[in-house]
Amino acid sequence: MNIKEEIEKDFLRLQKILRELRFLRYNHMNNKDRRAKIEQAIQLLGPMSDEFKSRLDEMTKPVGDYDL
């Protein structure tokens, strides 16, 4: 497996985790302590997701027409 595929897998896993955390945050809106912990986790993992996304964008070759 190449590096790009590994980064894609990690990125997709992280996106899934973030989505689940957002659902949890919504379900625990009335519990201030739990909501704060969930929001902290989202804030910690968000930049990591952005980093993976930027690395994937760098690895993607431009798509378009090439004139010869």
Image: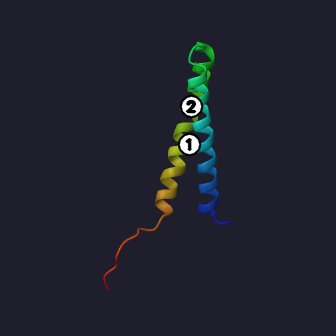
Amino acid identity at mark 1: Met
- Labels 2 and 1: the sequence-earlier one: 2
Circle nearer the viewer, 2 or 1: 2
> Which residue is farthest left?
67
Q: Secondary structure at mark 1?
A: helix
Instruction: Give the Cα separation between the discs numbered 2 and 1.
Output: 16 Å
Amino acid identity at mark 2: Arg
- Whether 67 is drawn above or below 55: the answer is below
Name the quadrant of the N terminus. Answer: bottom right
What is the image's colouring? rainbow
Q: Choose between 43 and 12: the one closer to the eye.
A: 12
Circle 2 residue = 22
Residue 35 location, quadrant: top right
Q: Residue at x 48, y 52 (%)?
A: 54
Q: Please state the horizontal and vertical placement of residue 61, each as a whole percent of the image.
A: 45, 68
Residue 28 location, quadrant: top right
Q: Please state the horizontal and vertical placement of residue 25, each as a whole percent of the image.
A: 58, 25
- Whether 31 is drawn above or below 22: the answer is above
Residue 8 location, quadrant: bottom right
Q: Secondary structure at mark 2?
A: helix
Q: Please state the horizontal and vertical placement of residue 53, each as a whole percent of the image.
A: 51, 51
Q: Residue at x 34, y 79 (%)?
A: 66
Instruction: Specify the label residue 48 is tagged with.
Output: 1
Q: Residue at x 60, y 50 (%)?
A: 12
Q: Choose between 30 and 6: the one closer to the eye.
A: 30
Q: Residue at x 64, y 58 (%)?
A: 6
In-image side of 21 versus 50 (left or right): right
